[in-house]
Image: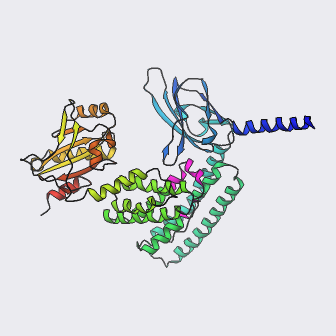
Amino acid sequence: MKQVFKLVLIVAVITLSHTTFAEGRKVTISLRGVYNATVAVSPFAGMRIGAPVVQDVLLANKGTMQVDVPMTLIPGEFQFKFNYRKQASDRPTPVEINLFLNHEDIHIHINPLYATGDSLTIDNDVENKVFGRFMAEVGQRRQQIGLLQQLLMGYTDRKAAVVKEAEAEMKKLSGNYNKWVKQLEEQNKALYVSRLFRFQYLTDLGQDGSGNTDALTAMAKKYLSVIDFNDTLVLRSRQLNEFVGGYMGLFGQLATTEALRDSLFTQAGRIACGLAAKGAPKMYGWMVDYFYAGYESYAIDPGMKMLELHLNNPDCLTSKRQAIEKRLEGLKKMVIGAEAPAFEAQMADSLLFRFDGVPKEKNYGLLVFYDTTCGHCSQLMQELRNWYAKLENAVWFNIVSVALNENRQVWKSAHRLEQFAWNDVWAPGGVNSEAAGKYFVLGTPMLYIVDPDLKIVAMPKDMAEVEKFLNQD
């Protein structure tokens, strides 16, 4: 009896140790075809790349390395980034590939010069092969459906016999296609990638193009019905992000004006976040994060105000709670007629710069918060330089541009390349600086026009609105 008990105990301990201390997946990488390359492996996490599992490990030609991926990140999609040199004297060239990891330890054989197709081989792989074959066949099956869609879009006579025939054929092909996707999803349900197949379903949206609120709501709900809002594992890939991007594209096609765009995108967020609220808290939070990023990028204030409702829901696990709260506070405080706060920043020679008024010889002050690494900012600054070079514009404004780069040296290097005709300064701390905090700047670019009494008189989104302000009656 004692021996049996000991045997059971030993088996239990072994089983427990394997369960509790299970190692992660092993990914072996073999490099060929180049002199060397640094390798970084990072998981996808929501809308961004997560913290790297390995960062910039140097691998020589014909060299091999092993990456241990923690089980906490499995299953999921990962970015493999190679900065390679073809020859020793070359500058590094980046190449990125995205791969799924789940049940198997895999061995990747890669030549970064040809990192796609048959040139990339993976031993012991199932997930990526299945997903690759699936997406290839999706393209083939959708091609014929796409041709029918083009035919229907080109016909203005909706009652024509050819239109009726095309509609019937497209309905048949779409039905068969969706059955095929569902069948593959069921056949491969043991694989992580099978849960991503659903993002390739075709949905009859019934879009009439009228922009009618009820019709848009029905269209949006049909589109989003593909998402399983309780499946948090889809947050470990790019697929959900790309799918919701397509959803926003439907609304964007109807946005003929900026005001209509703001209204439509706010409606899109209201519907999507409302549906996500019925699912898992992580999915709900992700959806709120997604729309926060879009509303912040396009300065859509009605959308930002709409998100306030979701901040009050304890089931919303948003990572942007503080940012949204700060933006909402800014929308209340930074309004036309409010006082423009004074602030301090640094000039290129490290001397202190203080903004606390508009010179007497100028009618207005223009504050421009930007980042030298921001693409939209670079475009704005070029437009501003061209606009300010005209004397009839320069006489009106005293411009102060405030760089919100986290790294002072990055700003200073860019500053040296420019011949600024105004004060260009740097705010230590970037978006966490005193200046950014006082003006509730969370993203760049952002502009404020102030009068000699230090009152905010306009908050233009671009140079066209600056011009419009200047030319108003």
Q: How many marks?
A: 0
- What residue is shown at x 55% (from left), y 63% (from top)? 278
Above or below — where is 160 with respect to 142?
A: below
Q: Position of residue 237 (x, y in %)?
A: 55, 48
Q: Residue furthest right?
A: 1
Q: Position of residue 139 (x, y in %)?
A: 57, 54
For the N terminus, which image quadrant? top right
For the C terminus, which image quadrant? bottom left
Q: Position of residue 22 (x, y in %)?
A: 69, 37
Residue 257 makes an appearance in the image = no
Q: State the residue in front, 95 or 290.
A: 290
Above or below — where is 120 with respect to 136?
A: above
Q: State the residue in front, 139 or 217.
A: 217
- What residue is shown at x 54% (from left), y 56% (from top)? 281
Residue 194 makes an appearance in the image = yes
Above or below — where is 68 with respect to 197?
A: above
- Does the segment drawn in magenta span residue 226? yes
Q: Residue furthest left?
A: 361
Q: State the residue in front, 470 or 321.
A: 321
Asked whether, in this view, residue 69 is left or right of residue 91, the answer is right
Q: Position of residue 182 (x, y in %)?
A: 66, 60
- The picture quadrant where one finds residue 410 is top left
The segment highlighted magenta reads: 224-243
